[in-house]
Image (tube, rainbow, N blue to C red):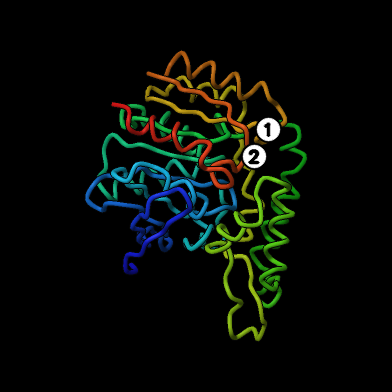
Amino acid sequence: MSAPGSSDVPGGSPRVVEEIEIPVPWGFVSGKWWGSRVKQPVLALHGWQDNAGSFDRLCPLLPEDIPILAIDLPGHGKSSHYPKGMHYFIFWDGITLIRRIVKYFGWTNITLLGHSLGGALSFMYAASFPDEVDRFISIDIAGPTVRDHHKLAASTGDCIDKFLHYETLPESKMPCYGYEEMIELVLAAYDGSVDYDSVEVLMRRGMALAPAHLNKDGYHFARDLRLKVALMGMFSLEQVLAYAECIKCKVLNIRGQPGMNFGSAEVYEKVMEVLRRTASKVVYYEIPGTHHLHLVTPDRISKQVSDFLLEI
């Protein structure tokens, strides 16, 4: 565990930030703890192939007396990768991961903040432990991604072969890039969802210097290559709606406009319909911005998030 530091963004308050490591059976989960270590924090969960830096611009805009623990999910950022031979079934694995963290710290009545995949994991945990979650915030996602089963069946063999390829790829074959080259590569891959400055924020944890023994100059991606084929554990709409029926807590859902193109726009609405019936409270906003609006334009959502967190 490193010494505390501080972080600031224009318009935000200086916040003490500490790097932490949470032990897990395969290594550790890394995170950034914003604010007091005495109070129970909000647990913040980033999107697929992002990292804890996803919240670097939002956290300084939130109430100083509400601590936040933003983690790197397994295989992301500075967190340990899964052992060889293990698939990432990220939507399912995340429920157990959150449970491990809750038990490790001895938390009760928890609050979750998630973007994209992290929002889906918050949804799943709130459904799985409905009496132990006080509230959750979901940014630009309603629930786990629904995948057409015919497409899933058709792609399964290819996914398995890709997984085995990535697992056996020699370290010497790991792609290596110059700093600017990597930033531009990521910027293009996000297809307008982030800007240059946001990519630089994410890559503070998302890239690492090439190992010295490879005699290569430059950087490689810190995340596990196997995450590229981590989408096999998908859900049917019926499953997602069944989980939605179990959720009792307060829910804040912020949808970006245009946000993410999920392919089946009606799925988002159907999930929200169920939540409005079952959750104790649902607050819903549509706010102009990209899928990463919490990172690119955090000032547009900071008040809504703050009000929801402070609400008694």
Tag 2: residue type?
A: Thr
Q: Residue at x 68, y 60 (%)?
A: 164
Quarter of the image where one finds residue 85: bottom right
Q: Seen in the image, is 312 located left or right of residue 260?
A: left
Q: Residue at x 36, y 42 (%)?
A: 42
Looking at the image, the residue that sits furthest to the left is 38
**Residue 67 at x, y percent in the picture:** 32, 47
Q: Residue at x 68, y 78 (%)?
A: 172
Q: Residue at x 53, y 30 (%)?
A: 254
**Residue 225 at x, y percent in the picture:** 64, 60
Mark 2 — residue?
A: 290
Mark 1 — residue?
A: 258
Mark closer to the chain start, 2 or 1: 1
**Residue 196 at x, y percent in the picture:** 66, 56
Quarter of the image where one finds residue 20: bottom left
Q: Seen in the image, is 161 located left or right of residue 5?
A: right
* Residue 274 to residue 259: above or below: above
Q: Quadrant of the N terminus?
A: bottom left
Q: Are marks 2 and 1 in contact (CB under 8 Å)?
A: yes
Quarter of the image where one finds residue 14: bottom left
At mark 1, the secondary structure is strand
Q: Residues within 10 Å of mark 2 (few under 14, many from 20)?
A: many
At mark 2, the secondary structure is loop
- Spatial CA distance of label 2 from label 1 is 6 Å
